[in-house]
Image: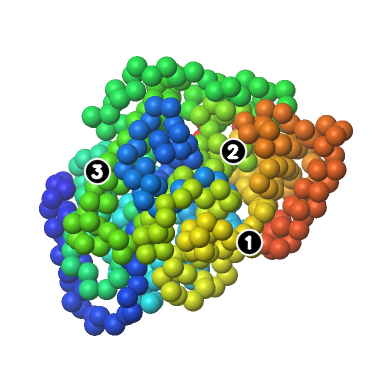
């Protein structure tokens, strides 16, 4: 087994050799980019968003020196589809990564490839999670440190530019060591660093210093945990399954421990962000670097009787999204407009002065973060999720969210009749989604309006439903251990 210091030295040597083996093209002055992505972090899992006990001073510093997107969402709340959307700027039905077992298509445009082709030095470090059994270097990256599948919180086997070794240590600290080392190397060109964290994905194992960080915090079920009456029947049917609140998800039966460990893993992520920030400052690159921090999807911690993502409820689809870049963001602000994961790729290439990314369906938020306003910004957006045979606990979902309303539709597959009750929420007065208005006589005109808007968005984005699977019967058994 190689120790972490030796492994860093191998990585640095690989980087130096790569830099010396090819000529360095001249590029105009452009911002460096650091893109940090966590796994399953809810929108409110940082103190800048008002969390009652989780303190994240380093994330708060990014927010307080840049922008916090108060209403950031993912168009599919599932790790691999969302990650592909972050990179490509496309909906899942467009980029084709519809589940956690599909590779990112090698010929699909992405902002890392665009920056690489424009002369950027590029690195990916950490969790990739698009394709379970492949840890090979992906297109667009000069420097590559990743692993197969989920990785483990302790002693993960990494592929460092083709050298595979088990690296001892806690995952968050290890990938941060790699990232800080890479940032400390000489960079004669603008650079892109993508840093992918495992945390706070389950099974939640905090680092040693944080194992008991929240032992004295009372953890009770959320207000909507047992509010089943307004929900479709499938929610009650799965309550004792792998993704239900009464199931045995990850083998944790203690709800309090479940909650405390989830948040404790985020403390290490916050430490990591602080170390990356300081590394940029030490290198004299802090203020000419665009820093973007995001979660790949949200997570239900008991809300709506669920322990998972995938669904269209707020806790599942809403994510943290922060950005810092002083030349563009002269005044720190909170952005209230709805911003999506598909907006990140178009924004990065726009801010870096590159041509628009081919096929991107999102919008650049450059004007929005600079001025706080964009009169052409979206008023509604499409949500999609496809039933998975590997995790058969959530049906197909297609829905539309506006600033104030949400309509959730459960198609049973192409050309098949609906079998699940739909949902309609007036978010402006019901942010916890406690009152399903789908059968409310006074809400029928709004329902018809949202149905029409959903149809419009499906057509506009090219979602024909051709790739939508047929819903199977919800399964009570847990998923295979190899894919959890």
Left or right, 406 with reference to 178: right
Left or right, 172 with reference to 473: left
Labelled pair 3, 2 in contact (Cβ < 8 Å)? no
What residue do we see at 62% from left, 31% from top?
432
Q: How packed is label 3: few (under 14 Cα within 10 Å), some, or many (20 or more)? A: some
What residue do we see at 35% from left, 72% from top?
30
What residue do we see at 58% from left, 51% from top?
337
Q: How packed is label 2: few (under 14 Cα within 10 Å), some, or many (20 or more)? A: many
For mark 2, what is the residue? Answer: 314
**Label 1 vs label 3, nearer the camera:** 1
Say which quarter of the image contains residue 420: top right
Inspect this view and state whether residue 130 appears: yes
Mark 1 or 3, nearer chain start: 3
User: Which quadrant holds the C terminus?
Assistant: top left
SS for callout 2: helix
Say which quarter of the image contains residue 164: bottom left
Mark 1 or 2, nearer chain start: 2
| Number of dots carrying numbers | 3
**Residue 401 appears at what percent x and percent y?**
67, 47
Tell me which colouring the rendered structure shows: rainbow
Inspect this view and state whether residue 345 appears: no
Mark 3 or 2, nearer chain start: 3
Left or right, 168 with reference to 294: left
**Residue 21 appears at what percent x and percent y?**
20, 78
Q: How packed is label 1: few (under 14 Cα within 10 Å), some, or many (20 or more)? A: few
**Residue 212 appears at what percent x and percent y?**
29, 22
Left or right, 451 with reference to 99: right
SS for callout 3: helix
Q: CA distance from mark 1 to mark 2?
A: 25 Å
For mark 3, what is the residue? Answer: 173
Q: Nearer the viewer, residue 5 or 299?
A: 299
For mark 1, what is the residue? Answer: 375
């Amino acid at each position: 087994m190689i120790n972490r210091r030796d492994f860093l030295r191998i990585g640095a040597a690989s980087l130096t050799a790569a830099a010396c083996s090819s000529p360095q093209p001249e590029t105009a002055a452009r911002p460096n980019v650091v893109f940090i992505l966590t796994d399953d972090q809810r929108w409110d899992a940082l103190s800048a968003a008002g969390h009652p006990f989780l303190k994240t001073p380093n994330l708060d510093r990014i927010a307080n020196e840049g922008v916090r997107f108060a209403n950031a969402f993912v168009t599919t709340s599932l790790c691999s589809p969302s990650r592909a959307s972050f990179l490509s700027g496309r909906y899942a039905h467009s980029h084709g990564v519809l589940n956690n077992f599909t590779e990112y298509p090698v010929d699909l445009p992405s902002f890392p490839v665009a920056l690489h082709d424009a002369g950027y030095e590029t690195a990916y470090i950490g969790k990739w999670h698009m394709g379970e059994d492949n840890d090979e270097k992906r297109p667009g990256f000069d420097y590559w440190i990743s692993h197969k599948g989920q990785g483990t919180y302790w002693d993960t086997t990494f592929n460092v530019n083709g050298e595979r070794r088990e690296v001892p240590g806690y995952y968050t600290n290890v990938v941060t060591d790699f990232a800080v080392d890479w940032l400390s190397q000489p960079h004669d060109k603008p650079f892109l660093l993508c840093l992918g964290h495992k945390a706070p994905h389950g099974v939640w194992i905090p680092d040693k210093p944080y194992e008991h960080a929240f032992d004295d915090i009372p953890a009770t079920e959320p207000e909507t945990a047992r509010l089943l009456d307004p929900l479709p029947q499938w929610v009650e049917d799965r309550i004792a399954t792998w993704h239900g609140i009464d199931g045995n998800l990850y083998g944790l039966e203690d709800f309090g421990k479940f909650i405390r460990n989830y948040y404790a893993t985020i403390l290490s992520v916050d430490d990591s962000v602080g170390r990356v920030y300081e590394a940029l400052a030490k290198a004299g690159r802090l203020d000419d670097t665009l820093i973007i921090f995001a979660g790949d999807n949200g997570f239900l911690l008991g809300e709506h009787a669920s322990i998972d993502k995938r669904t269209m409820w707020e806790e599942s689809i809403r994510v943290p999204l922060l950005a810092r870049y002083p030349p563009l963001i002269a005044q720190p602000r909170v952005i209230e407009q709805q911003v999506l994961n598909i907006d990140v790729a178009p924004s990065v290439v726009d801010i870096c002065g590159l041509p628009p990314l081919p096929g991107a369906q999102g919008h650049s938020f450059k004007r929005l973060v600079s001025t706080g306003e964009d009169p052409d910004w979206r008023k509604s957006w499409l949500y999609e999720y496809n039933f998975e045979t590997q995790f058969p606990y959530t049906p197909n979902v297609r829905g539309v969210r506006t600033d104030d309303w949400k309509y959730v539709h459960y198609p049973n597959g192409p050309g098949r009749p609906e079998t699940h009750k739909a949902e309609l929420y007036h978010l402006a007065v019901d942010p916890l989604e406690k009152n399903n208005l789908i059968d409310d006589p006074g809400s029928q005109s709004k329902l018809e309006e949202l149905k029409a808007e959903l149809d419009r968005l499906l057509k506009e984005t090219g979602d024909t439903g051709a790739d939508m699977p047929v819903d199977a019967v919800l399964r009570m058994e847990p998923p295979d251990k190899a894919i959890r």
